[in-house]
Image: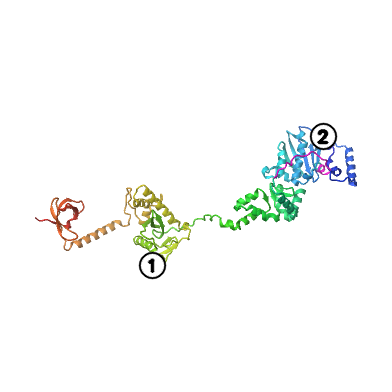
């Protein structure tokens, strides 16, 4: 009779309550009223139209706390009615779950009419529209199963305001309808019996979760301002919330009561993982508003995690100021190579490295002595940058800086990156020395190649930047005199040299005659001053230089001034 009597399930709800196993039979005035109303409906004519496959089809659905209602319409005329009373388990469904269950009920009940054709579903529950566009993975398990049941049907969802037929069918005493097999037991919540009972008890005693459970079951209002303040922050998650076995569920996550949140946080952080990992663990199983912030505060305050946390990330680079001229700022450090200690001093402007091997003990006095040698050749720089090693962080080195008049700046202790220029120079020099040694190359020649190589396509070599001229290396190169007024300087040098020669030759100077090969001469012994006999064997290309042979067969090279003509 349900196809012909609208709202039959709601009308008979009061009467059907008498046949339940746990109910006592007691006929009252309300039962008599319901009985009389059903009789009146049976005797009232209800006109249904014939179903036409060529006309557009609409299924109106609605759900109440008692039952489900559905009406099959064409041209706004009823073709068939259907209603179903909710089971005790279904009555505890969330409102959105009951509304979607009504869609499933309507489609399965009118399967013969709609299967294989396109139709429209109308419901007055607005959140259903959002569910249709949501990923199935982000919906609660029960809604997922309902959506899977709707997969065979080709329908469009259309919100409706006045669902008169479906609303009445769901409210006016629905009859016991066919069971919709959705409640497959899936143990999503893995708890011991005691823990589950405790969580159910704490959920019931939590005022906020109790109000939230009631709102989920009875339905959400259209405006969040109509909600109590304590549950307004659940408004954005209302489509994912449901009640199952006395617990509030958000998707597949359990909403933890406030009294158990501290214990849950400790369990989340039991492995002392970082903030992101702990939040990922919580995302798989539990939820409460602000859980991510609570996890962040817990992990940040964990003394064990703080003791074993990673080093700070690298900060933005603060480069040293580029000097305005060569040898204005230099860096210095010590390095160990091939079982020996070396001192390196490099110019910040030209990048030219000076290397000195330390003999004996490497003390502050030794470092100062080698540094003075280099400064005496190149000049005293304005600033010297070093680390805080014992060679530099000493009274002797500070006194050296005061006496020689340069600023001594040290980098941060235990932080070599702050002295990065000289550290990088050490890497380059050590790599050059290692490669030269392994390839049997002259180490000093390898360092010369390093110093005469341009820094890039525009900047010349360190040697040219420091000395203002090119250095001749193992490659052929044309070296020009780039000194300003070079011709005048050359003439002045020639004049000075000529004047020096004139002054030398002015007093007690005479030219000695040249010697010939085979000529017997006397050579002066440098130690005793005595003259010994010898024979000229050859004339050397150098000025006034000859090769002679002594009576005992020794070949010696001597200057003409050290010989005297031998007279027999």
Q: Is residue 243 left or right of residue 461?
A: right
Judged from this view, the residue extending furthest toward the top is 53
- Seen from the viewer's position, the closer of residues 550 and 323 is 550
Front one among 463 and 431:
431
Labelled disc at residue 498:
none
Q: Position of residue 221 (x, y in %)?
A: 75, 50
Q: Does residue 129 show up magenta in the picture?
A: no
Query: Toward which corner of the image does residue 422 lie, by quadrant?
Result: bottom left
Residue 429 vertical position relative to residue 502 in the rendered view, above or below: above
**Residue 498 at least partly seen:** yes
**Image location of residue 139, percent across then percent down:** 69, 45
The residue where tag 2 is placed is 49
Give whichever of 445, 553 is nearer the camera.
553
Q: Position of residue 46 (x, y in %)?
A: 86, 37
> For the magenta stretch, what is the residue range?
167-187
Q: Which residue is mark 1?
A: 403
Colouring mode (rainbow / by chain / secondary structure / one colour): rainbow
Q: How many marks?
A: 2
Q: Does the segment drawn in magenta span residue 175?
A: yes
| Residue occupying image coordinates x 30% and y 56% | 486
């Amino acid at each position: 009779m349900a196809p012909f009597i609208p709202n039959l399930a709601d009308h008979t709800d009061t009467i059907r309550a008498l046949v339940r196993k746990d109910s006592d039979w007691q006929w009252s005035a309300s039962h008599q009223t319901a009985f009389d109303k059903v009789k009146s409906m049976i005797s009232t004519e209800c006109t249904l139209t014939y179903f036409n496959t060529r006309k557009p089809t609409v299924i109106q659905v609605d759900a109440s706390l008692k039952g489900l209602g559905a009406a099959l319409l064409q041209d706004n005329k009823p073709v068939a009615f259907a209603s179903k009373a909710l089971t005790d388990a279904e009555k505890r469904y969330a409102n959105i779950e009951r509304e979607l269950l009504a869609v499933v009920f309507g489609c399965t009940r009118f399967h013969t009419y709609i299967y294989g054709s396109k139709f429209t579903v109308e419901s007055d529950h607005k959140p259903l529209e959002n569910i249709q566009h949501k990923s199935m993975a982000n919906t609660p398990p029960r809604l997922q199963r309902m959506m899977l049941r709707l997969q065979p049907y080709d329908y469009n969802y259309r919100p409706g305001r006045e669902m008169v037929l479906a609303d009445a069918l769901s409210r006016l005493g629905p009859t016991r309808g066919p069971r919709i097999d959705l409640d497959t037991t899936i143990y999503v919540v893995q708890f011991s019996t005691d823990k589950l009972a405790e969580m159910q008890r704490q959920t019931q005693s939590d005022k906020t979760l109790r109000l939230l459970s009631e709102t989920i079951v009875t339905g959400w209002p259209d405006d969040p301002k109509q909600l109590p303040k304590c549950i307004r922050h659940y408004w954005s998650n209302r489509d994912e919330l449901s009640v199952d076995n006395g617990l509030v569920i958000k998707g597949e996550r359990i909403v933890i009561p406030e009294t158990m949140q501290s214990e849950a946080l400790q369990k989340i952080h039991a492995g002392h993982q970082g903030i992101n990992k702990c939040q990922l663990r919580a995302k798989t199983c539990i939820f409460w508003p602000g859980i991510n912030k609570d996890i962040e505060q817990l992990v940040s305050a964990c003394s064990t995690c703080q003791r074993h946390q990673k080093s700070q990330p690298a900060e933005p680079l603060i480069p040293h100021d580029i000097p305005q001229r060569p040898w204005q700022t230099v860096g210095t450090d010590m390095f160990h190579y091939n079982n020996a200690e070396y001192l390196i001093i490099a110019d910040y402007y030209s990048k030219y490295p000076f290397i000195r091997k330390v003999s004996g003990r490497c003390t502050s006095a030794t470092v100062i002595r080698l540094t003075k040698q280099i400064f005496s050749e190149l000049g005293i720089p304005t600033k010297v940058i070093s680390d805080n090693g014992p060679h530099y962080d000493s009274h002797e080195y500070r006194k050296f800086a005061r006496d020689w008049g340069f600023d001594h700046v040290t980098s941060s202790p235990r932080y070599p990156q702050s002295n990065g220029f000289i550290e990088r120079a050490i890497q380059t020099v050590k790599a050059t020395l290692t490669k030269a040694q392994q390839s049997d190359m002259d180490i000093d020649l390898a360092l010369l190649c390093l110093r005469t190589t341009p820094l890039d396509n525009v900047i010349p070599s360190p040697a040219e930047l420091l000395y203002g001229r090119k250095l001749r290396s193992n490659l052929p190169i044309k070296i020009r005199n780039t000194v300003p007024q070079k011709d005048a300087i050359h003439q002045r040098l020639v004049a000075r040299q000529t004047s020096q020669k004139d002054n030398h030759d002015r007093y007690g100077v005479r030219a000695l005659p040249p010697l010939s090969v085979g000529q017997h001469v006397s050579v002066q012994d440098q130690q005793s001053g005595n003259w010994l006999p010898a024979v000229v064997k050859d004339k050397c290309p150098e000025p006034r230089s000859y090769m002679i042979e002594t009576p005992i067969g020794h070949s010696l090279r001597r200057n003409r001034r050290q010989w005297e003509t031998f007279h027999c």
